[in-house]
Amino acid sequence: MTDDLSQVNLVLFFTGGVSLHTWDRLGMLDREVALYRELRPHLKSITFVTYGKTGELNYQDRIGDIKVIFNRWRLPQRVYMLLLQNTYSRRWGRNVICKSNQFNGAFVALGAAKRAKGKFIARGGYHYSVNIEREFGANSKEAVGARREEARVFNAANQMVVTTPSIRNSILEQHPLDPERVSVIPNFVDTDVFQPGPSDNFSSKRIVFIGRLEAPKNLISLVRSMKDVDAELLLIGTGGKDIELRQIVNDESLPVRFLGKVPNNDLLKILRSAALFVMPSHYEGHPKALLEAMACGLLVIGSDVPGICDIIQHNINGYLCGINPNEIRSAIETLLSNKELRTELGANAKKYIDENCSLERVKDMELQVLNQVIQE
């Protein structure tokens, strides 16, 4: 392996089943690609390995000179994974770093790195096996399998990258690893885009949530918290709870609007028009929507749970609350009525993002890890 990053080929392996089309459909393509556009001038090449079909070619203009490998033959996913590990890996040479975008499915990147005699970075935005335990139970076959897969991946990785100190601590508690091999790099915000607008929105009574409409987001409690609140809640996103949430809103005549999917760049106008951003989840990884709201100087309310309390310091750069409707409602009403506190906490939120999560800072942290890996 060279000790010169300009000779390194970085290959990013998407999570199983995920494609550029998936990113685009979820309104996150440009956001996800931004970091790799910044890294590209420092490397010989960057390649995305996705699970899309020929439609992936439609995104070449939006990803620049980043290469794309996709399932052009429409093979069964298991067969395609084997092809990635045993055939494509021969093209990259020994100066290759294979990196997973999430821990789920990272064994494909590991297999390709071994075959290419390159390096392997296991990156994850959340602790995969812990999320599986929450969904299926700690002793379920799904959780046992997830922990087994993690152990295989973690023990073989040259370096692991997670987004928060609490995820790092959780992994080190579960797996006997060298702490030096587990780095923390937060999700980034493009602070040239996400920044406060010129208008004063302290008279606004608009509240925003952005994310998947799924059970872990605790949205039933959120919409019910709006009962008798003199404000409007906008729900941005799609998911399996959509129909149930709409039924509750309709039956209880709640001041909630569903906007569905909104492209990432269009979120800026909505965030700038709001008084509050609320994320009442049962748990999180390192939520990008929360970071982007903070970058806009918006006062954020979050539940006091892992992944959110890593970011929000109560009454310093945001406001923490419980997860039931009454606790969420109390926080909303307290902050809607306190202009001075919203001004102070919103300014502190922006400062936090500028200092910790800007695209420039995260790019430098990524380059530091890449340099560390090639010098091993």
Image (tube, rainbow, N blue to C red):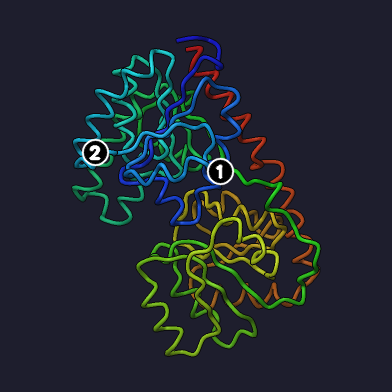
Give the Cα separation between the discs numbered 2 and 1.
33 Å
Q: Nearer the viewer, residue 238 or 66?
A: 66
Q: Position of residue 320 (x, y in %)?
A: 60, 62
Residue 339 occupies quadrant = bottom right
Q: Position of residue 250 (x, y in %)?
A: 44, 87
| Residue 66 visible in rendering | yes
Q: In this view, does 293 lie above or below 257?
A: above
Q: Left or right? Give the position of 62 relative to 315.
A: left
Looking at the image, residue 168 lies above or below residue 271: above
Tag 2 residue: 73
Residue designated by label 1: 187
Q: Which of marks 2 and 1 is nearer the N terminus?
A: 2
Q: Which residue is drawn at 48% across and 40% down?
A: 60
Give amino acid for label 1.
Answer: Asn
- Cβ–Cβ below 8 Å for labels 2 and 1? no
- Would you call the spot at circle 1 few (<14 residues within 10 Å), some (14-19), or many (20 or more)? many
Provide residue 135's location: percent of width, then percent of height. 30, 57
Relative placement, left or right, of 358 versus 257 is right
* Residue located 73% across and 59% down the image: 346
User: Could you say whether the residue bearing mark 2 is in a helix, strand or loop?
Assistant: loop
Indicate whether 375 appears above or below 282. above
Q: Is residue 172 visible?
A: no
User: What x and y, as percent, mark residue 374?
Assistant: 49, 15
Choose top left, top right, bottom left or bottom right for residue 113: top left
Closer to the camera: disc 2 or disc 1?
A: 2
> At 32% across and 22% down in the image, what residue appears?
89
Query: On the picture, is 289 further left or further right than 294?
Result: left
